[in-house]
Image (cartoon, rainbow, N blue to C red):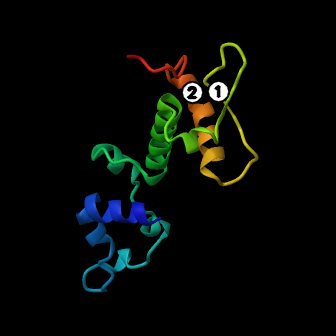
Amino acid sequence: NVQKRCMRILFGNKEAYLEKFKTCSRARPFHEQILGPEFFVKEHTKPLFKKHSIMTVHNQYYYHTLSEIIKILKHRTPISLFNLFELSHRPGKETLLIYPQPSDSFTYRSSVLWNNSRSKTAYADFSESV
């Protein structure tokens, strides 16, 4: 994808990239002119993301969605968004969200993300601490 290509260009191994594309017969010895499958292997980007502390687009989506849902549920504002979510009434599960009809809406996707990540957080309730 585009993000990985940009990471390879910005932070990748420049010498290996330049060496890879020396395809002129004068630049590459004769026995290395036939390009095998190793020529088409791309550099891994996960170590580049980790080294430069950059989040992937998917991780940014999860991070921002969860931070927004926490703000909406904890502060109950904006009220128009808060009213779209339905909290569970089961004892001990008050921070679970009841899914709306499955769709691509923010309400459904954020509810699924919240319920999946809720076990890793320390939220026992959404009451305001003063």
Which residue lies under the disc numbered 1? 96
Of 129 and 49, nearer the camera is 129
Tag 2 and tag 1, C-beta contact below 8 Å: yes
Residue 66, x across and y down, in percent: 50, 38
- Residue 8 is left or right of residue 85, and the answer is left
- Residue 119 is left or right of residue 58, and the answer is right
Q: Amino acid at mark 2?
A: Arg
Residue 7, x across and y down, in percent: 34, 59
- Residue 115 is left or right of residue 79, and the answer is right
Could you say which disc has been placed on residue 38 in the image? none
How many numbered marks does the figure carry? Answer: 2
Taking the spot 43% from the left edge, 66% from the top edge, the residue there is: 2
Q: Earlier in the sequence, mark 2 or mark 1?
A: 1
Label 2 vs label 1, nearer the camera: 1
Taking the spot 27% from the left edge, 62% from the top edge, the residue there is: 10
Which residue is outermost to the bottom?
A: 25
Which residue lies under the disc numbered 2? 118
Which residue is outermost to the top?
A: 91
Find numbered disc 1 in the image and state the secondary structure of the residue it sits on: loop
Which residue is outermost to the front?
A: 79
Q: Is residue 18 above or below residue 64?
A: below
Of 37 and 112, nearer the camera is 112
